[in-house]
Amino acid sequence: MRTYVDANIFLYAALYDDERGRRCRDALAGIVRGATDAVTSALTWDEFSHVVERVRGRSDAITAGERFLRFPRLAFLPCTADVLIGAQRLRAETSLGARDCIHAATAHIARANVFLSEDSDFDGVAGFARRPA
């Protein structure tokens, strides 16, 4: 089973010490252990780096972004023309925002069965089951 990991999983894990942050860190630890076949979009780096910079500053964002790109056992998938075509179709068919459409289209192309995300907007998107951390 392949799992697409949404940007918010990395963000909660990195930025918050609450229960949600702990659950996200636990989910990411499963990927590191090899318990999950995990993929994400190159777009995830952009979102992660951007939010970390807003919350913690540029220096922390650079350091966190470098660590993020070395995340073990996580495949980074490109944003190709096929992804954008799929995203455009999802934009017309769902209420997802543009970036979320890119994530969902990438998950579809990667044949991910599970969409690991804290964002319930992905509930009901055909082709995968959203699972919170």
Image (tube, rainbow, N blue to C red):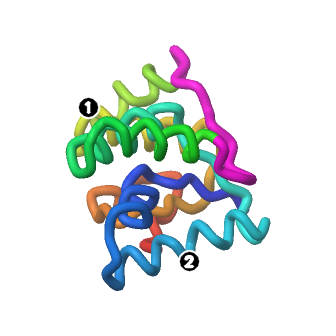
Q: Which residue is mark 1?
A: 92
Q: Give the magenta part as a residue range.
A: 70-82
Which callout, 2 or 1, points at the residue further toward the start of the chain? Answer: 2
How far apart, in angstroms, are the residues tagged by discs 2 and 1?
A: 35 Å
Q: Nearer the viewer, residue 62 or 129?
A: 62
Residue drawn at (56%, 62%) of the image: 114
Of residue 113 and residue 26, the one placed in the foreground of this image is 26
Residue 77 included in the magenta stretch of the image: yes
Q: Is residue 26 magenta?
A: no
Question: Which of the numbered marks, if any, corresponds to residue 112?
Answer: none
Going by the image, does 84 lie left or right of 47? Answer: right
Question: Which residue is denoted by mark 2 in the rendering?
Answer: 26
User: Which of the image's four quarters has the N terminus?
Assistant: bottom right
Residue 94 appearing in the image: no
User: Residue at the location (60% across, 39% down)?
Assistant: 69
Give the SS element for disc 1: helix
